[in-house]
Image (cartoon, grey):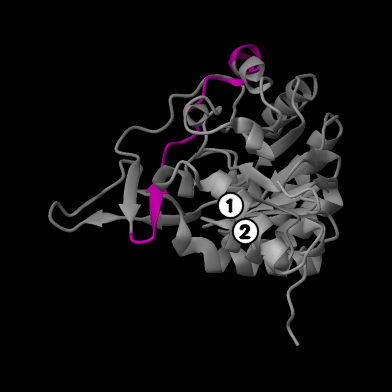
């Protein structure tokens, strides 16, 4: 890394050595990708979505490729928060990358319990998942209205002793209202976007491709929507934004920073290219060098619109 260039960012007390984070649900707990590259290179890792108890997730098939992306209806398959703390944190702490725990719940009380448990764990931040489209209760049912977001965030805020990031769903009429509700209720930052609700049909069988019928769409196809939403939210709130949605390289990441993000998450791109995270970091650094930008924070909100 060029010593003349600063890639460090501070997201409401979450210190990252660079602004690239592995997105929740695409990176597991890092074990598989650690065979491809040094996880020390990452700014942070947002781990697989966690729940109080282990979940098997939805029945297969639960992945479908689409033009420019994938649909998933995995449904928060995970070992449970206690197994994560016992088995996965010790592995992740071998690396110099911030640990962000992605927390889900079916009820407000479960979100409170998750936040309390994770606040006592050796992690660096909590990402409150109010936006998973593949779970019938909780998650998106809370995240789809300002009142729902406010009610959860306000309650868990009392238990949060780590930076609290609220992950927003794009499956709403006006995402700025949702973001403002999160900010007003005490969120330290917001991350967006989660997947867009979609569907695939097999014309030959006349059946849905996914057993769950619908799933969350991610990948390059959602990037224009994600950029627009990050830009809108940046105009509406004063807390930091972590942007995601179709980022595959450094140029994509810079676009999100210019739209208003302070950091980015890369996810689906890693299924195609396991080095996507590393190449994104290098791409940001190359852009900064070529454009004489000394500090990555200068890019945030730097979009020229006149």
Residue 269, given in percent of the width and then of the height, sits at 47, 49
The residue depicted at 84 percent of the width and 37 percent of the height is: 157
Question: Does the segment drawn in magenta span residue 84?
Answer: yes
How would you rate the neighbour count of disc 1 (Cα within 10 Å): few for under 14, some for 14-19, many for 20 or more? many
The residue depicted at 79 percent of the width and 34 percent of the height is: 156
* Disc 2 element: helix
Residue identified by numbered label 2: 253
Q: Is residue 138 above or below residue 207?
A: above
Contact, mark 2 vs mark 1 (Cβ under 8 Å): yes
Residue furthest to the bottom: 306
What span is colored magenta in the figure?
Answer: 67-87
The Cα–Cα distance between marks 2 and 1, rounded to whole angstroms, is: 7 Å
Looking at this view, is 286 or 187 the one in front?
286
Residue 153, given in percent of the width and then of the height, sits at 78, 42
Residue 97, given in percent of the width and then of the height, sits at 69, 32
How would you rate the neighbour count of disc 2 (Cα within 10 Å): few for under 14, some for 14-19, many for 20 or more? many
Q: What number is the disc on residue 280?
A: 1
């Amino acid at each position: 890394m060029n010593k003349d260039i600063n890639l460090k960012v501070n997201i409401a007390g979450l210190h990252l050595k660079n602004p690239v984070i592995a997105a929740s649900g695409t990176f597991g707990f890092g074990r598989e990708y650690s065979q491809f590259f040094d996880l020390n290179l990452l700014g942070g890792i947002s781990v697989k979505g966690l729940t109080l108890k282990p979940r098997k997730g939805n029945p297969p098939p639960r992945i479908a490729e689409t033009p420019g992306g994938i649909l998933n209806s995995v449904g928060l398959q995970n070992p449970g928060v206690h197994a994560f703390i016992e088995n996965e944190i010790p592995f992740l702490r071998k690396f110099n990358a911030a640990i962000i725990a992605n927390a889900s719940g079916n009820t407000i009380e479960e979100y409170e319990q998750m936040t309390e448990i994770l606040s006592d764990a050796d992690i660096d931040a909590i990402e409150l998942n109010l936006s998973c489209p593949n779970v019938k209760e909780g998650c998106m049912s809370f995240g789809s209205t300002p009142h729902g977001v406010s009610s959860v965030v306000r309650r868990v805020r009392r238990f949060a002793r780590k930076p609290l990031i609220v992950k927003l769903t794009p499956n709403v009429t006006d995402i700025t209202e949702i973001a403002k509700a999160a900010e007003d209720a005490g969120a330290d930052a917001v991350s967006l976007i989660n997947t867009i609700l979609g569907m695939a049909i097999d014309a030959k069988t006349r059946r849905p491709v996914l057993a769950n019928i619908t799933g969350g769409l991610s990948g390059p196809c959602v990037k224009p929507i994600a950029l627009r939403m990050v830009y809108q939210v940046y105009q509406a709130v004063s807390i930091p934004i972590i942007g995601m949605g179709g980022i595959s390289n450094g140029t994509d990441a810079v676009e999100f920073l210019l739209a208003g993000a302070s950091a980015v998450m890369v996810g689906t791109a890693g299924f195609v290219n396991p080095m996507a995270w590393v190449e994104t970091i290098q791409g940001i650094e190359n852009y900064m060098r070529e454009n004489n930008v000394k500090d990555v924070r200068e890019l945030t909100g730097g979009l020229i619109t006149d």
